[in-house]
Image: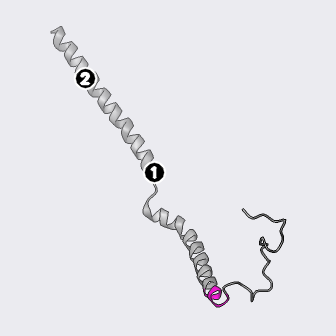
Amino acid sequence: MTATGVIAGISAWIIRKLFRDSEKLAVRITSLEKSLVDRKYLETQLAPIRADLNLILSHLLEHRKTEKDDPHGKGNADAPKIPTKTDDPSITLH
């Protein structure tokens, strides 16, 4: 009888340990699910970035059109002049 009692006690301990571990895992999974980023949240976070990128892209495409008309930028007198090697011999370009 004592052997069956020991076996029953060990079996009960193992079963309780397994259920306790599965409950802990369920709590951890629940906490991880709360922190996961879903697609809808991601889209709302990326919307301002996409708007900025579209603005930059439209500006660059518009600049490309004006660059084709005036490839060396000679028509823009307000633009600062970028020094070249021929302008000042003391400047070394890397």
Q: Is residue 54 above or below residue 40?
A: below
Query: Label 1 to label 2, Cα distance in Å?
Result: 33 Å
Instruction: Name the disc covering residue 56, or none.
Output: none
The three-letter code of the residue at mark 1 reads Lys
The answer to which of marks 1 and 2 sits earlier in the sequence is 2
Vertical placement of residue 31 versus 46, above or below? above
Number of the front mark, 1 or 2? 1
Q: Is residue 29 left or right of residue 89?
A: left
Q: Looking at this view, is 43 or 85 the one in front?
A: 85
In which quadrant is the N terminus drawn? top left
Q: Which residue sits at x=60%, y=73%?
A: 52
Q: Give, as a three-letter code, the residue at label 2.
A: Ala
In the image, residue 73 lies at what x, y percent? Answer: 71, 84
Q: Up-down: is 68 above or below 15?
A: below
Residue beneath the point at 32% across and 27% down:
17
Callout 2: SS: helix
**Residue picked out by circle 1:** 34
Name the residue beneath numbered marker 2: 12
Q: Residues within 10 Å of mark 2 (few under 14, many from 20)?
A: few
Q: Residue 21: horizontal and vertical position, in percent?
A: 35, 32
Q: Which residues are magenta?
A: 65-70
Looking at the picture, tell me which residue is in the foreground, 10 or 45. Answer: 45
